[in-house]
Amino acid sequence: MALDIGVARITYGTVLPALRRDLSLSFFEAGALSAVNLAAYLLGTLIAPRLGRIASMRALARWGHAVFALGALASALAPEVLTLALGRVLTGLGAGVGLLAVFVGVFEQTRPGSRSVVSVGVWSGIGVAIVASGLAAPWLLGEPGSWRSAFGVGAILAGFVAWEVGRRPAMMPRAAGALGTGPVAEALAPRSATAWLGLFGAYFMFGV
């Protein structure tokens, strides 16, 4: 999770000043690149529970990270803004599905009595990654074209996570659709209109 969030921080908003500088983007174009990335992330998190009814959390984690890696690679090699936007859409979708699958998979395999401790570890790792990515930004993105290297590193790390999840069946061994209790079942449960409104509100505040 720390790797995921650290990479997402670098490849989401931190690259924007460098992109705007090197590609001579308008404020609208730069903002649009962020908007399509976050919209795709939102879409990925919303469709992941439906995908979880037909695939395992392990499969979703693996393919979500593979899609992220593909999008980051496309962004790194993008010759113009449209290709870069496509890469940003793919990274958003991949992160939305892959992060949710890893998160649910971790807590599904954690004993109920240990979930609070594991939660502290997960969220602390995310916090460390956010701080580290912010501190690394001037070093990573100071030179012209450096954003391509940042996306390239993101592609490599996402590919590594996809490989590790796929290589270790014990990490997420069971099909999500076969589970009747626990975090997976809760994540896959049908939502009421009120729950959807609350979810929208949470994402709206994140966007703000």
Image (cartoon, rainbow, N blue to C red):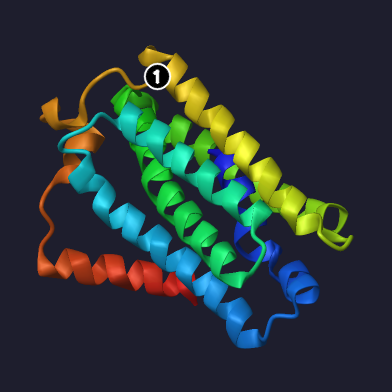
> For mark 1, does the 10 Å Cα neighbourhood hold few (<14), some (14 to 19), or many (20 or more) residues?
some
Q: Secondary structure at mark 1?
A: helix
Residue beneath the point at 33% across and 25% down:
113
Task: Say if residue 63 shows up in the picture.
Answer: yes
Left or right? Give the position of 136 relative to 98.
Answer: right
Left or right? Give the position of 198 relative to 178.
Answer: right
Residue 192 figure quarter: bottom left
Residue 39 figure quarter: bottom left
Left or right? Give the position of 137 relative to 99.
Answer: right
Tell me residue 14's x, y (percent): 69, 63
Q: Which residue is mark 1?
A: 171
Residue beneath the point at 15% across and 69% down:
194
Tell me residue 68's x, y (percent): 50, 46
Instruction: Give 159 or 9, whichever is nearer the viewer.
Output: 159
Tell me residue 97's x, y (percent): 36, 46
Residue beneath the point at 10% across and 52% down:
190
- The amino acid sitting under disc 1 is Met
